[in-house]
Amino acid sequence: MRIAFAMINCNRRDGSARAVNEVAERLAGRGHDVHLFARKAEDLDLRLVTWHPVPGVAWPEVADFQSYHARADAMLKRHDFDIVHSIGPNTSRANVVTIQNIQPAKKIILDRFAGTERVSLARRLTRWLYLRVTSAAERALYTRKPSPLFLPVSRGAEKELRSWYDIGDAMVRIVPNAADTAIFRPLAAEERQAWREANGFAESDVIAIFSGGEWARKGLDFAIEGVARCHAPNVKLFVAGDDADRSRFAELADRLGAAGRVIFGGFRRDMAEAMGAADLFLFPSHYEAFSLATIEAAACGLPVLATRINGTEDFIQPGETGEFLEHDGAQIAQVLDRLAGDAALRRAYGAAGRKLVEEKYTWDRVAEMTENAYADFLKSHESARL
């Protein structure tokens, strides 16, 4: 097959972009002619994938999207591909779309926290414009006839797709996110000890790791409150990532008397090592499509403690791979206290989570699922023409 991916920027830092890199390389390795239309192509083997640079205005975000969308449409029109695979509504010429989130659904959550964010009026305006423009692009592409093939990353993402847009009898295949199990893995004892010592943790500390930006949406305030209310004094929260509103969360930790137990680690290049050296993954998020960090944490052998949202509903098996949390600091503290005092239970959860990732959430399996979905889609359209 001749396959084109449309993604504004490709790298292995951002979740959506990482999925493109991982799948594109594997499909190329399977003998397909794979092309990438993107502004940037980082951490991608360009011996396998043909990159078509897409110039445009990179800021603000709404201009970035609009200029990419227009230029990608024009560039793709000059080529003949079997599959044009867009991550969200990046191009109107897509016949396959990965659904990482639904913009109107995400907007509801963002609006809920708008009053507490310390962001400028200009930032609020550009975000509003971005959500408005991308929502319109979603509607145009997702309700188009003939329908594209939809690849939501979770059951929840599929439910939101069907709830917000009339997609009729369009073909839908759930293709989840995944983890690189060679990179994200349990650490050997000496590796674990070295990371902990280098980052100021004692071996007796029970590290709950939180990952990502957009801290209000991801529920960092509840994670901080949960740690603050723990009876186990050795439970520490390591926050990997950053946020423009960082000072507000630092003030919250201080106000709750947990400043010494909450460590703001900033953006990490050693994310796999940080997870491998931790003891628990703590993620009381309000909204996700299917958090890559959740799968990567499980691949590192961590129990996954998260709210019942898109993706975690598919992954967490309570009492086996992790536990569901509530947006309630007291409930989170109870879960943390129980696991902090039971290392054997943590190891059992972690081993079960690692096994589940190896069986169902590897990039090799995701590439195979994607390839099979393409073949089914093209076959159905060929049959329809006969």
Image (tube, helix red, strand yellow):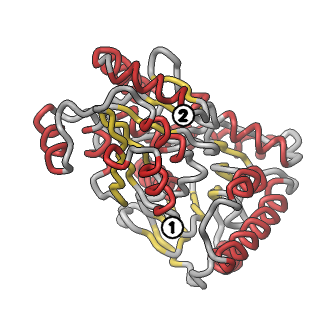
Q: In this view, does 39 lie to the left or right of 30?
A: right
Residue type at numbered disc 1: Ala
**Looking at the image, which residue is at 71% across and 46% down?**
150
Q: State the SS at label 1.
A: loop
User: Is residue 111 shown to the viewer in this render?
Assistant: yes
Which of the image's four quarters has the C terminus? top right
Q: Total number of numbered labels?
A: 2
Q: State the SS at label 2.
A: helix
Residue type at numbered disc 2: Gly
Q: Is residue 144 left or right of residue 16?
A: right
Mark 1 vs mark 2, CA separation in Å = 23 Å
Indicate the quadrant where residue 151 lies: top right
**Looking at the image, which residue is at 60% across and 30% down?**
326
104 vs 351: above or below: below
Q: Position of residue 384 (x, y in %)?
A: 84, 43
Q: Mark 2 points at which residue?
A: 329
Q: Mark 1 points at which residue?
A: 244
Indicate the quadrant where residue 353 lies: top left
State the residue in front, 263 or 70: 263
**Looking at the image, which residue is at 10% across and 36% down?**
190
Indicate the quadrant where residue 228 lies: top left
